[in-house]
Image (cartoon, rainbow, N blue to C red):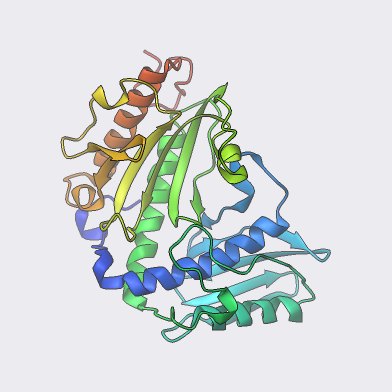
């Protein structure tokens, strides 16, 4: 596991935003294929991607009577289709537009006898050009992608450790392609109040009380890579609870709030892992205590504080 500042790379959004946007849209295409082929799971866990040893993967999915896996190899800079016949791929490189990626990916699937239908347009992002027509987004900075992969690998490992401290219902550590963040969520087991005015995606995502924790590399509104947490539904008095370390803060987001900690504050900490775990635990303590969760009952035997 990466633990020293020298091993956590800088990731300023301004330096790689065109590449980040291109990679995000490629990931949406792959994520929509997973959504179309994986059996439904609560809170849309069937739609997400996962960090693996070289980048991002769908893990095993199935269509047209065949098992297959789609993966971004961000070390070798190739996109992979794995089946029991072997591996087919094409290079990830500067100039490969979203339209080109879409065409090549579906050509690989067709050659393998795999048919998948998706709604081939972006979701939840400012970009709205259909994938097959988007030749604007075509940036691929290898150095930036490699730094992003290193950050994803480290965050995934740290969130996996944090997830083990909780013995209630907990999500996988997963990458949500609509917002391009990596996250893990803890649940109280209680249903949340009904949300009749919300869309179907939101109703399913927030059907139960949840405290979510994650990282995203930045976007049009949050201009720095950031760690976050939120509690939904938000309990009264949440933002009166303290966060750690001192640089963490509560940020209003419409009618609710997020706990946030800049990636740079973690990267520059004497012990980045300890700094992130301290932030995650403080955000959990704030949400769980304000919402009346039974924190002692949810404490895993792997929690370093023990059962006290």
The location of residue 206, given as percent across then percent down, is: 54, 35
The location of residue 227, given as percent across then percent down, is: 32, 46
Q: Is residue 304 visible?
A: no
Q: Is residue 264 visible?
A: yes
Q: Quadrant of residue 198?
A: top right
Q: How many marks?
A: 0
Q: Is residue 221 above or below residue 293?
A: below
Nearer-the-camera pick, 249 or 144? 249
Name the image quarter holding the C terminus: top left
> In x, y percent, where is residue 286?
32, 24
Q: Position of residue 288 (x, y in %)?
A: 40, 22
Residue positioned 39% across, 57% down in the render: 152
Q: Is residue 81 left or right of residue 15?
A: right
Is 257 placed above or below 237 here?
Answer: below
Q: Quick check: 108 above or below 267? A: below
Q: Is residue 296 left or right of residue 199?
A: left
Rendered residue at 49%/57% (across/down): 124
Q: Quadrant of residue 183?
A: top left
């Amino acid at each position: 596991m990466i633990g020293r500042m020298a091993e956590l790379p800088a990731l300023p959004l301004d330096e790689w935003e065109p590449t980040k946007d291109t990679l995000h849209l490629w990931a949406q295409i792959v994520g929509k294929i997973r959504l179309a082929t994986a059996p439904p799971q609560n809170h849309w866990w069937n739609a997400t991607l996962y960090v693996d040893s070289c980048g991002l993967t769908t893990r095993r999915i199935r269509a047209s009577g065949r098992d297959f896996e789609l993966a971004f190899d961000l070390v070798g800079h190739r996109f992979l289709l794995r089946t029991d016949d072997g591996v087919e791929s094409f290079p990830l490189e500067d100039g490969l537009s979203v339209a080109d990626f879409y065409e090549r990916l579906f050509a690989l699937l067709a050659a393998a006898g795999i048919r998948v239908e998706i709604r081939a347009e972006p979701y939840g992002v400012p970009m709205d050009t259909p994938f097959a027509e988007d030749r604007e987004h075509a940036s691929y900075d290898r150095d930036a992608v490699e730094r992003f992969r290193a950050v994803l690998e480290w965050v995934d490992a740290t969130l996996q450790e944090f997830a083990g401290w909780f013995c209630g219902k907990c999500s996988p550590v997963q990458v949500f392609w609509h917002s391009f963040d990596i996250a893990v969520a803890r649940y109280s087991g209680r249903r949340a109040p009904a949300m009749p005015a919300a869309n179907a995606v939101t109703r399913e995502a927030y059907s139960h009380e949840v405290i979510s924790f994650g990282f995203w590399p930045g976007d049009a509104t949050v201009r720095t890579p950031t760690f976050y947490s939120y509690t939904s539904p938000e309990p009264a008095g949440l933002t009166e609870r303290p966060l750690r370390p001192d640089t963490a803060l509560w940020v209003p987001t419409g009618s609710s709030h997020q706990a946030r900690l800049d990636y740079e504050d973690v990267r520059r900490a004497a012990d980045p892992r300890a700094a992130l775990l301290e932030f995650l635990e403080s955000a959990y303590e704030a949400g769980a205590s304000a919402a009346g969760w039974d924190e002692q009952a949810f404490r895993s035997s792997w929690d370093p504080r023990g059962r006290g």
